[in-house]
Image (tube, rainbow, N blue to C red):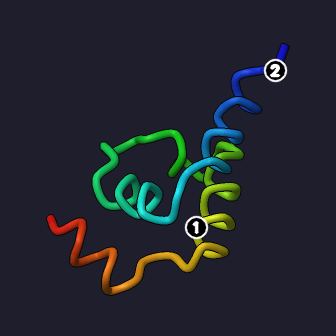
């Protein structure tokens, strides 16, 4: 059985660029993917950058 950490990393690896941008912009404070003491941040950051990160089109589409 996979542990919780591996499951969360798999979720990150399945996210689209748009989903990641949306989470980055709208995640509540303290979201575990953005906690630098957890392994999720490095995985999320690396994948998001590989996908192209924020683009003007995504940013406009997400709004505030």
Quadrant location of the C terminus in the rendered image: bottom left
Q: Nearer the viewer, residue 58 or 39?
A: 58
- From the viewer's perspective, is residue 27 above or below residue 53? above
Q: Which mark is residue 17?
A: none
Q: Up-down: is 23 above or below 9?
A: below
Mark 2 surroundings: few (<14), some (14-19) or many (≥20) residues within 10 A: few
* Residue 52 image-quadrant placement: bottom right
Residue in the image at 43% along x and 41% along y: 31
Residue picked out by circle 1: 48
Q: Are marks 2 and 1 in contact (CB under 8 Å)?
A: no
- Furthest residue to the top? 1
Query: For residue 54, what is the image quadrant?
Result: bottom left
Residue 57 figure quarter: bottom left
Which residue is located at x 67 percent, y 50 percent?
13
Residue drawn at 81 percent across, 20 percent down: 2
Residue 49, above or below 42: below
The tally of labels here is 2
Q: Residue at x 32, y 86 (%)?
A: 56
Answer with mark 2 or mark 1, whichever residue precedes in sequence. 2
**Image location of residue 59, percent across then percent down:** 29, 76
Give me the C-alpha separation between circle 2 and circle 1: 23 Å
x, y percentage for residue 14?
63, 47
Q: Residue furthest bottom?
A: 56
Q: Quadrant of the N terminus?
A: top right
- Report helix, strand or loop for mark 2: loop
- Give percent across and percent down for residue 60: 22, 78
Q: Residue furthest right?
A: 1
Q: In screen coordinates, is 30 left or right of 50?
A: left
Mark 1 is surrounded, within 10 Å at the Cα level, by few (under 14), some (14 to 19) or many (20 or more) other residues, namely many
Q: Which residue is mark 2?
A: 2
């Amino acid at each position: 059985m996979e542990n919780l950490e591996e499951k969360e990393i798999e979720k990150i690896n399945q996210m689209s660029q748009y989903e990641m941008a949306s989470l980055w912009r709208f995640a509540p404070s303290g979201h575990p993917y953005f906690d630098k003491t957890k392994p999720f941040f490095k995985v999320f950051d690396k994948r998001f950058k590989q996908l192209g990160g924020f683009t003007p089109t995504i940013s406009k589409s997400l709004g505030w």
